[in-house]
Amino acid sequence: MNNGLYYALCGALTLGVLAGIAMMSRVRWAAAGNLLSAGCVAAAIALTLWRGGIIGDTLLWICAGAGLVAGLAGAWRVAMIAMPQTVGLLNGLGGAASALVAYVALIDGPPIGIFGQSAAAVALIVGTATLSGSLVAAGKLQRLLPQQPVRGRARQLITLVSLLSALALAALIPALDGASQIAAALICAAASAALGAAFAVGVGGADMPITISLLNSLSGVAGAIAGMAVSDPLLVAVGGVVGASGLLLTRIMCRAMNRPLVGILAGGAIAPKRENGEALRPEPEDAPGPEPEDAPAGGPDEAAALLAEARFVIIVPGYGMALSQAQERVRELADWLERDGREVLYAIHPVAGRMPGHMNVLLCEVDVPYEKLREMDEINPRFAQCDVALIVGANDVINPAANTARDTPIYGMPVLDAARARRVILCNYDTKPGYAGVENPLYSDPRALTLTGDAKETLEAILAALAAHGA
């Protein structure tokens, strides 16, 4: 295959990946876009094997088949609730693949020159750090590791020493050869792994969606740099697409949480932007007036009575909905309300759940019409008009303390203004602080009705009460 044809195919496949990503922004075309991008990546793999003259290697196809079977089995078995940690793990595997390409290019490949060796050393750092950071993030999401961020001088020292060591070794690797270059590359990889792990353990639960999107970006960056090391324009292009899209998503998430990326990387609770010394989102002045004397005392029957009288309901899903797999009951409740002419909308916070778009995926899984899912900026002005805000497993993203509780991880973070609704029904597992560890004053608000326990069971009880009420 001549270079002209190869570069043309590389460009076409890269455009195909970009087109697939663009299609994923529309629910109607999302599945087709995912298939298009995956198909283009599969074709890119076949093209690379063909150009390299190894497409007929039997051992290679045995390994590829084993990986395909393992991937399909894992994807089939993983529950939707475990999707965030699965995405984190896949980010890590992408970094590991790039690190292996870089290592082989340094140690066992054809001569690649000073530039190629330098690029391989950088890819080794980024890929290995992505692997270790992703494993720690997945472990946190799976609750195999402590949820709270690890801070302190020891972590800062490990981060600084590992970063400087990795950079120094990366600069030294091109000047070495033989056993000394192998040793330097292995030590560099070990230092990079320590760097990635130290970064990830310092990130708290409130910032986990940002961490996942950032690690996704880094996996693409590692691939692009590895492509430079082995002079593969296709790997550079596709890796660049993944890196850029992940970085854009990271920036969107940071803006949604009103937190600077540098502060998150530093591992601290960073003060958000302020205007004239006040929180960027002050407590709304048009909050509901004095609470009525007959504020509900609790129980599914009271919740059903409130919903039966409501004409406009906003449902706020959160991680608890995913944990209890209550999305089907949420849809049934919305259907019951809409059959009687009530308006029902869903308020989606950008960082609800454990990864970007987590709630959208769960609700679309049960055929909730996408046009009923409203983003935060669009839905917040409507909370003051709604009769009931129904919270299903959400805490931090509806915590009004974000407007007032200084020196906390969520201070200044834009939240859904559920507290402005005439009534609030909270279907949460308990009244403990959320993942960010900040008390939620909504639980003690006289206008709020709190129903603790498994969200799915709570919604089933409310549905039963509504059926009895309707009868």
Image: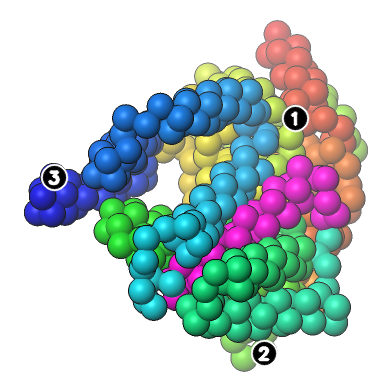
State which quarter of the image contains the C terminus.
top right
Q: Return the mark for residue 1.
A: 3
Q: Residue at x 72, y 67 (%)?
A: 194
Q: Nearer the viewer, residue 287 or 372?
A: 372
Q: Return the mark for residue 193.
A: none
Q: Residue at x 45, y 75 (%)?
A: 118
Helix, strand, or loop for circle 3? loop
Q: In the rendered structure, which segment of residues is drawn in magenta?
A: 118-147
If you read the primary sequence from the N terminus, does the residue marked by circle 1 or circle 2 appear first? 2
- The residue lying furthest to the top in this view is 471
Type of residue at label 3? Met
- Read off the residue under disc 2: 277
Quarter occupied by residue 331 = top right
Q: Return the mark for residue 324.
A: 1
Type of residue at label 2? Gly
The 10 Å Cα crowd at callout 3, few under 14, some 14 to 19, many 20 or more, is few
Q: Residue at x 47, y 57 (%)?
A: 108
- The residue lying furthest to the bottom in this view is 276
Q: CA distance from mark 3 to mark 2?
A: 64 Å
Does 315 appear above or below 406? Answer: above
Q: Nearer the viewer, residue 134 or 52?
A: 52
Type of residue at label 1? Ser
Residue 134 forms part of the magenta stretch: yes
Helix, strand, or loop for circle 2? loop
Q: CA distance from mark 3 to mark 1?
A: 54 Å
Q: Residue at x 78, y 76 (%)?
A: 158
Q: Position of residue 280 (x, y in %)?
A: 61, 77
The 10 Å Cα crowd at callout 1, few under 14, some 14 to 19, many 20 or more, is some
Q: Nearer the viewer, residue 387 or 266?
A: 266
Q: Is residue 145 left or right of residue 167?
A: right
Residue 257 forms part of the magenta stretch: no
